Image: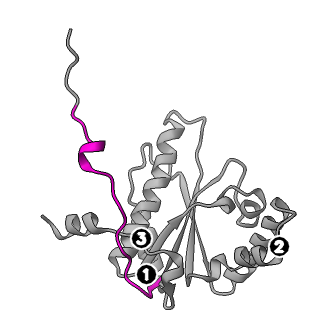
Amino acid sequence: MTELSEFLLKRRSVVVRNMEEPGPSSEDLEKIMRAGMRVPDHGRLTPWRFIVIRGEAREKLGKILGDAFRKENPDCIDEQVKIEEERFVRAPSTIAIVSRTNPEHKIPEWEQILSSGAACQNMLTAALGMGFAAQWITEWYAYNDDVKTALGLESGDRIAGFLYLGSMTDAPSDRQRPEYEDIVSEWTEPAA
């Protein structure tokens, strides 16, 4: 078995609460995003964009997140808003992966969306392979119009996920995985 295969069989995301400085350098971030650009892309449509959130931008976007949360949850308490405002400062860097499809193109939109998911996975794997802590998250704010506007998304753009990046405070423990036999089958021709 190759080293890559062994890595993939043991791959485990690191939750954001277990991240700290340092995060990836600019050169590291470029490598991670270039890995995201190497995914299958039927028709060479490049149906994804990457937005880096780091430094002071994390706090500024956090304030927008807090306001958006309060708007969606008018009965929330200040502590809940504070939690939302701190989401982006938990990790040194975050990459928003934007799915930008062309539904009018002959390549089915579903394939374009899958390419964005593949970009998320490639970047997650690249970051982990480089020794960084990484977690791919898609929560309420990925679907919030105020957050999407603040990120400069165009009409029809969707957030495929936020990739949080940093260094590990603790090694991740594995979680329960499905049994191979429960999810794998082999197709055989139906009896006539």
For the magenta stretch, what is the residue range?
A: 166-186
Q: Secondary structure at mark 1?
A: helix
Q: Which residue is mark 3?
A: 13
Identify the residue at horizontal 43%, vertical 81% (top origin). 28
**Magenta stretch: helix, strand or loop mostly:** loop
Could you tell me the amino acid type at mark 3?
Answer: Ser
Residue 154 appears at what percent x and percent y? Answer: 71, 54
Q: Along the line of sight, which residue is nearer the eye, 107 or 168?
A: 168
For the residues bearing labels 1 and 3, Cβ distance under 8 angstroms: no
Q: Secondary structure at mark 3?
A: loop
Q: Which residue is mark 2?
A: 77
Q: Which mark is residue 70?
A: none
Q: Which residue is mark 1?
A: 28
- Report crowding for label 1: few under 14, some 14 to 19, many 20 or more residues within 10 A (C-alpha): some
Is 21 positioned to the left or the right of 156 in the image?
left
Is 168 situated above or below 145? below
Residue 75 appears at what percent x and percent y? Answer: 86, 64
Q: Quadrant of the N terminus?
A: bottom left
- Residue 168 in magenta stretch: yes
Gap between marks 1 and 2 measured at Cα? 38 Å
